[in-house]
């Protein structure tokens, strides 16, 4: 089979080589890749670590082979249409004709997700796995908000949630999951390319779309205005830009904690300690490392560690439940994928796609690569 190796230096480049089709370990699924999705980490992690790798982690395709333990579950069969989250930085990634995923981060696609044909409803599966897992762990594991399978009641009091970078794939999936859990009002902060957010927000429940380009102080004033006196104890910086220290003004939008009501700000970059003096001392900053869905642990070198290491160990078990519930939401229409753009050239287009991603050209959509027809 053909596999793409991404080289980060001296400039980003790729090579395609022939390797054997991988064989599954007992708890793994080998997938014939039809569409591979992309994420900023596909080039960013390689650059920071100076390693070359098949770095793709978002898979949509068909089950090719099952590990011995997977066969016993009878949950999947050869030929099933699936999407999967490949373990980051591990062998047999998505940028290949065949890829591997553990059983617990594979989901079966409903019939209307016909991944062979190129249109939005059919190719979008490759936009889902990594970012929806990141959003899910952030909201339901780190911030302990109610998950979609146990949503808040319509009669429950408002539960405000601020999402910065809302038009990104990660921010958008956070909105979709919050909606599924009946978490409102959602204060979505974004810039351009935000049209896809409008159908997701419900003004009747206090949801609002705000523009960060008005400047920090004006942005904070608009958030306060939209909250209209409601205390807000939950925020998610889905961008976590080191260039702008985006988490600092977001932390200042939250209500100060009390012993009975802590305030949480989630971030997605593990490179910082988030100990700036301008962050109110009452605010707890939580770093989401999506790799815990597979490893059940943070890397010891990460400056920001979780509050409860023991709790993180059960993230893979939670991911098992989460992936199966996402499959249910896809089937009943409560969940959809993200807007996307297909990069021409199949595996040969990975280099140009990741370069465009590196240049910040994926705004409001995700780049995907069509690897096979069936």
Image (cartoon, grey):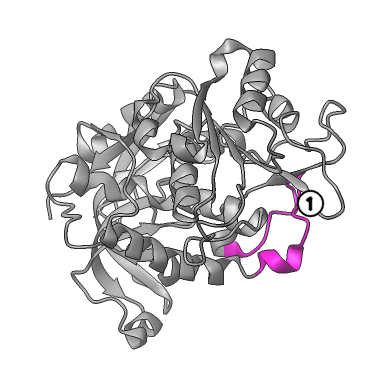
Secondary structure under the numbered disc 1 in the rendered image: loop
> Is residue 66 highlighted in magenta?
no
Q: Is residue 199 left or right of residue 219?
A: left
Q: Is residue 121 left or right of residue 220?
A: left
Q: Residues within 10 Å of mark 1 (few under 14, many from 20)?
A: few
Return the residue nearer the eye: 129 or 356. Answer: 129
Q: Is residue 153 left or right of residue 201?
A: right
Report if residue 89 is visible in the image. Answer: no
Return the residue nearer the eye: 46 or 331. Answer: 331
Count the labels in the image: 1
Residue at horizontal 66 percent and vertical 53 percent from the top: 143
Q: Is residue 265 left or right of residue 5?
A: right
Indicate whether 27 appears above or below 289. below
Where does the image place residue 311, in percent across and percent down from the top left?
70, 67
* Secondary structure that dominates the magenta span: loop
Residue at horizontal 46 percent and vertical 49 percent from the top: 179
Return the residue nearer the eye: 78 or 312. Answer: 312
The quarter of the rendered structure image containing the N terminus is bottom left
Where does the image place residue 333, in percent across and percent down from the top left?
28, 55
Give the residue number, with chain letter if any, for mark 1.
261
The quarter of the rendered structure image containing the C terminus is bottom left
Where does the image place residue 371, in percent across and percent down from the top left?
21, 46
Residue furthest out toward the bottom: 72
Residue furthest out toward the top: 214
Indicate whether 95 appears above or below 81. above
Where does the image place residue 3, in percent across and percent down from the top left?
31, 48
Report if residue 55 is visible in the image. Answer: yes
Residue at horizontal 36 percent and vertical 85 percent from the top: 73
Residue at horizontal 34 percent and vertical 31 percent from the top: 196
Return the residue nearer the eye: 155 or 4. Answer: 155
Q: Quadrant of residue 351?
A: top left
Q: Which residues are magenta?
A: 295-313
């Amino acid at each position: 089979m053909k596999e793409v190796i991404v080289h980060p230096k001296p400039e980003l480049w790729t090579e395609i080589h022939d390797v054997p089709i991988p064989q599954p370990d007992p708890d793994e699924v080998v997938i014939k890749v039809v569409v591979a999705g992309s994420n900023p980490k596909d080039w960013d992690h390689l650059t920071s670590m100076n390693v070359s790798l098949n770095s793709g982690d978002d898979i949509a395709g068909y089950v090719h082979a099952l590990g011995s333990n997977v066969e016993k579950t009878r949950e999947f069969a050869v030929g099933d249409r699936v999407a999967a989250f490949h373990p980051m930085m591990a062998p047999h990634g998505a940028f290949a004709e065949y890829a591997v995923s553990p059983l617990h981060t594979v989901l079966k696609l409903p019939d209307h997700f016909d991944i062979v044909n190129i249109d939005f409803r059919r190719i979008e599966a490759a936009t889902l796995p990594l970012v929806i897992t990141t959003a899910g762990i952030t909201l339901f594991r780190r911030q302990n908000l109610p998950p979609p399978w146990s949503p808040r009641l319509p009669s429950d009091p408002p539960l405000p949630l601020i999402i910065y970078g809302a038009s990104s794939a990660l921010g958008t999936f956070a909105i979709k999951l919050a909606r599924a859990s009946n978490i409102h009002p959602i204060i979505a902060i974004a810039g351009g390319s935000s049209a896809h957010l409008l159908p997701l927000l419900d003004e009747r429940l206090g949801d609002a779309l705000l523009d960060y380009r008005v400047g920090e102080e004006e942005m904070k004033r608009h958030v306060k205005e939209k909250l209209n006196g409601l205390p807000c104890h939950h925020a998610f910086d889905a961008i976590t830009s080191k260039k702008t220290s985006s988490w600092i003004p977001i932390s200042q939008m939250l209500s100060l904690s009390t012993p009975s009501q802590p305030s949480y700000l989630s971030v997605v970059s593990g490179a910082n300690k988030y100990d700036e003096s301008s962050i109110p001392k009452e605010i707890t900053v939580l770093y989401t490392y999506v790799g815990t869905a597979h490893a059940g642990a943070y890397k010891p070198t990460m400056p920001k560690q979780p509050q409860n290491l023991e709790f993180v160990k059960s993230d893979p078990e939670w991911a098992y439940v989460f992936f199966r519930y996402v499959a249910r939401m896809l089937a009943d229409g409560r969940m959809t994928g993200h807007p996307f753009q297909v990069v021409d050239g199949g595996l040969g287009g990975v280099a140009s796609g990741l370069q465009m991603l590196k240049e910040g050209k994926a705004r409001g959509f995700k780049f995907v690569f069509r690897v096979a027809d069936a």
